[in-house]
Image (spheres, helix red, strand yellow):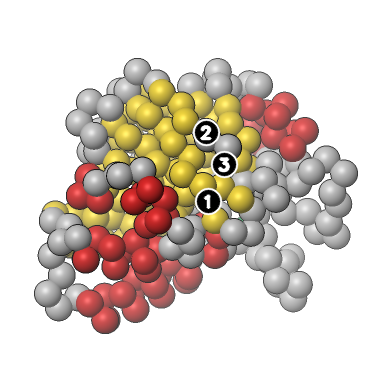
Amino acid sequence: MTQVWQGECVEVDVLFSKAGIATQILLTDRMNKNLLLMDCGDGTVRDLMDRNISFLDLKGVLISHGHPDHMGGLFSLLAALRLFRYKGDFTVYAPSRCPEVYSIIQFFLKLYQKGMSFTLHYHELKDQVFESLGEFIIKPFNVLHYESTKTSNKVKKSAFGYRVTLRGEVIVFSGDSLQCSELEKEVEGVDLALLEATYDDSFTEEIPNHLHHKYADYLGRSAKNYFLIHRF
Ligand SMILES: [Zn+2]
């Protein structure tokens, strides 16, 4: 299913999104073609190539949390930038205390730092602390999400949703989250909300970790436009 939204300033293309597999979303600044990814699950490189996206216009990626379906394509993405002789600065943003992302960055640099055509930046974000990339203004906000293994699923994971503003247009991405007031507050009134809706309404789990479709749909109605993504 194609999920593309065109605002005045920003175009949003959900390249792929399926819970447990991968989610990757592309934001395009329509004025200067700067590109920003939100999450980069497995297949991100394939999805960008399928759409004839120029890798040279990518400026960075915002990673919501360290579960593999949200960052499993990071190593391949960095390798593709190297292969295509990307020039300039590329920034990977992740929540602080995200060992999955940090270890991939370290591993990549250990293997390939010599002779790289571009500068790779790794930037750990803090709750509610703004960053900017090109004209994209980025605000990370804490959401409620847990580790996914049976032994550790009571441990809260460091996970963000993102609010991205471009010349007054506002996009919010939930990442993975349980129902929480932070998310509700951020979604209200925005131009486009991208909301995970992993669970069908009848689905129950011992320790819930995602939004149900019905609630995500309810939440989406508080935004001007919304897509339900990351379905199971
Ligand atoms: Zn997750």
Q: Position of residue 113 (x, y in %)?
A: 19, 75
Nearer-N-terminus badge (3/1): 1
Q: What element does badge 1 sit on?
A: strand
Residue type at the position of mark 1: Thr
Judged from this view, the residue extending furthest toward the bottom is 111
Q: Residues within 10 Å of mark 3 (few under 14, many from 20)?
A: many
Q: Quadrant of residue 206?
A: bottom right
Q: Is residue 139 above or below residue 224?
A: below
Task: Tell me the SS state at disc 2.
Answer: loop
Between the C-alphas of marks 3 and 1, the distance is 12 Å
Instruction: Note whether ligand 1 is within 8 Å of mark 3.
Output: no
Query: Residue 196 location, x and y as percent?
Result: 63, 42
Pointers 3 and 1 in contact (CB under 8 A)?
no
Q: Which is more N-terminal, label 2 or label 3? A: 2
Residue 23: mark in rendering:
1
- The answer to whether residue 72 is left or right of residue 207 is left
Q: Nearer the viewer, mark 1 or mark 2?
A: 2
Quarter of the picture holding the N terminus: top right
Position of residue 207 in the picture relative to residue 147 (left or right): right
CA gap, disc 1 and disc 2: 12 Å
Residue type at mark 3 is Ser
Q: At which x and y percent is residue 207?
A: 80, 58
Residue at image location 26% in from the left, 81% down from the top: 111
Q: What's the distance in space between the residues labelled 3 and 2, CA to CA?
A: 16 Å
Which image quadrant is residue 101 in? bottom left
- Residue under numbered circle 3: 174
**Mark sitting earlier along the chain (1/2):** 2
One can see residue 65 in this view: no
Residue on which the image places disc 2:
3
Question: Are there few (<14), some (14-19), or many (20+) residues within 10 Å of tag 1?
Answer: many
The percent position of residue 59, horizontal first and vertical second, equals 25, 48
